[in-house]
Image (cartoon, helix red, strand yellow):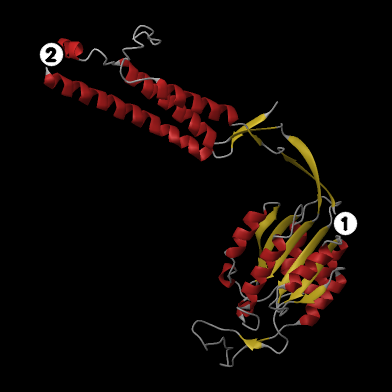
């Protein structure tokens, strides 16, 4: 059994034009008939115009409508594909945990830490093929932004909407992000799992190292990317040259804490890389992840569809040719043949 679909199904709405065309044609015929009555008696007019035909214009119109219908079907691209079948793919489960705390607005990496991280993630997703990907955002709390999926387009779409305000509680709870990721992976133990944490490492909320140990026991590898500079920069707020301050009115300086990120990666059999403006950190991490053994992931999909519009195109051309040779008036030379008997 073959599956059928229209690749451009939206073009089928053009069929709604056909009733309108029919209504316009009928209206034009009524107007034409009314105008002819103004010239004189219908019997006399028939004598004066022996070659006139009432049926031929209708036949030509019907032929054009049929041709138009076939053209609509052609541009809608009818396709046939084989039946639903099981296809085995090899991949891993990958979750990206992105720090969205206010410190990620620091501009020691252009245009700021958060935007640079988002661009790097898009660059990474574009390289993925058969892996499943999920996304977590965290600040003072952690939330699943994208559950594990193989729909990379949706993952990138949700990524564009990420900003610090997406998590109401500020702070940096790396441990919460790790624990949430551990619960978000599937229960299929045979699949290899990896977690990428992108953060400036300023963890103030929980014990991230303990969370990393628990994740490692579950077979989860953690790769960390430090984004920012160790010397530190202020956090911009609102207008230019306005920076975040503490309760004493002092400007807060956010610094990259590489130590905690390195410790997390070492504990969970991963790797740590510092990010820079070239977006090479995610590429390096991708190369590391590619070394992980990929296991079979069962999925179901249709095989490739093939276009089958050639016959419909031929029929459309045939009806156009027939319409061209059907005259609106009777032909004196062919009146004895009169294929249409009218």
Of the 4 image quadrants, the one containing the N terminus is top right
Residue in the foreground of this view, choosing between 142 and 194: 194
* Rendered image: mark on residue 293: 1
Q: Position of residue 74 (x, y in %)?
A: 54, 33
Residue in the foreground of this view, choosing between 45 and 219: 45
| Label located before the other in sequence (1 or 2) | 2
- The reply to whether the C-beta atoms of the residues labelled 1 and 2 are less than 8 Å apart is no
Q: Is residue 253 visible?
A: no
Residue in the foreground of this view, choosing between 250 and 278: 278
Q: Residue furthest top?
A: 336
Q: Position of residue 212 (x, y in %)?
A: 82, 69
Q: Secondary structure at mark 1?
A: loop
Instruction: Name the residue beneath numbered marker 2.
Output: 41
**Of discs 1 and 2, which sits in the foreground?**
2
Measured along the vertical axis of the image, is residue 12 above or below residue 322?
below
Task: Name the residue rendered at 71%, 90% in the picture.
Answer: 231
Q: Position of residue 146 (x, y in %)?
A: 66, 58
Q: Is residue 101 left or right of residue 89?
A: left
Measured along the vertical axis of the image, is residue 74 above or below residue 185?
above
Label 1: how many residues lie within 10 Å, few (<14), some (14-19) or many (20+)?
A: few
Separation of residues labelled 1 and 2 (CA atoms): 91 Å
Task: Name the residue rendered at 50%, 81% in the picture.
Answer: 238
* Rendered image: mark on residue 222: none
Q: Position of residue 215 (x, y in %)?
A: 82, 64
- How many marks can you see? 2
Q: Is residue 41 left or right of residue 114?
A: left
Of the 4 image quadrants, the one containing the C terminus is top left
| Residue 158 placement: quadrant | bottom right
Label 2: how many residues lie within 10 Å, few (<14), some (14-19) or many (20+)?
A: few
Q: Secondary structure at mark 2?
A: loop
Measured along the vertical axis of the image, is residue 91 above or below residue 279?
above
Q: Is residue 256 left or right of residue 219?
A: left
């Amino acid at each position: 059994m073959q599956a059928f679909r229209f690749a451009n199904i939206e073009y089928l709405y053009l069929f709604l034009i056909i009733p309108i065309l029919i209504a316009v044609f009928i209206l034009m015929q009524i107007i034409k008939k009314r105008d002819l009555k103004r010239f004189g008696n219908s019997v006399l007019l028939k004598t004066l115009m022996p070659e006139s035909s009432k049926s031929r214009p209708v036949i030509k119109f019907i032929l054009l409508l049929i041709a138009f219908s076939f053209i609509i079907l052609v541009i809608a691209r009818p396709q046939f594909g084989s039946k639903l079948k099981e296809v085995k793919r090899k991949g891993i489960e990958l979750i990206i945990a992105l720090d969205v705390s206010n410190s990620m607005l620091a501009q020691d990496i252009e245009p700021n830490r958060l935007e640079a991280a988002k661009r790097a993630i898009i660059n990474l997703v574009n390289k993925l093929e058969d892996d499943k990907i999920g996304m977590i955002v965290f600040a003072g709390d952690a939330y699943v932004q994208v559950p594990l999926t193989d729909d990379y387009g949706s993952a990138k779409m949700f990524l564009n909407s990420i900003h610090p305000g997406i998590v109401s509680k500020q702070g940096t709870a790396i441990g919460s992000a790790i624990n949430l990721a551990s619960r978000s992976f599937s229960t299929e133990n045979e699949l290899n799992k990896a977690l990428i944490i992108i953060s400036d490492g300023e963890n103030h909320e929980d014990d991230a190292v303990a969370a990393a140990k628990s994740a490692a026991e579950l077979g989860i590898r953690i790769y960390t990317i430090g984004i920012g500079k160790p010397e530190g920069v202020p956090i911009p707020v609102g207008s230019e040259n306005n920076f975040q301050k503490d309760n004493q009115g002092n400007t807060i300086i956010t610094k990259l804490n590489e130590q905690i990120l390195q410790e997390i990666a070492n504990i969970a059999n991963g790797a740590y890389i510092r990010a820079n403006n070239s977006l090479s950190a995610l590429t390096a991490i991708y190369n590391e992840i590619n070394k992980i053994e990929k296991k079979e992931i069962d999925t179901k999909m249709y095989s490739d569809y093939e276009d089958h519009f050639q016959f419909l195109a031929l029929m459309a051309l045939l009806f156009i040719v027939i319409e061209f040779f059907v005259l609106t008036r009777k032909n004196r030379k062919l009146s004895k043949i009169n294929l249409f008997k009218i």
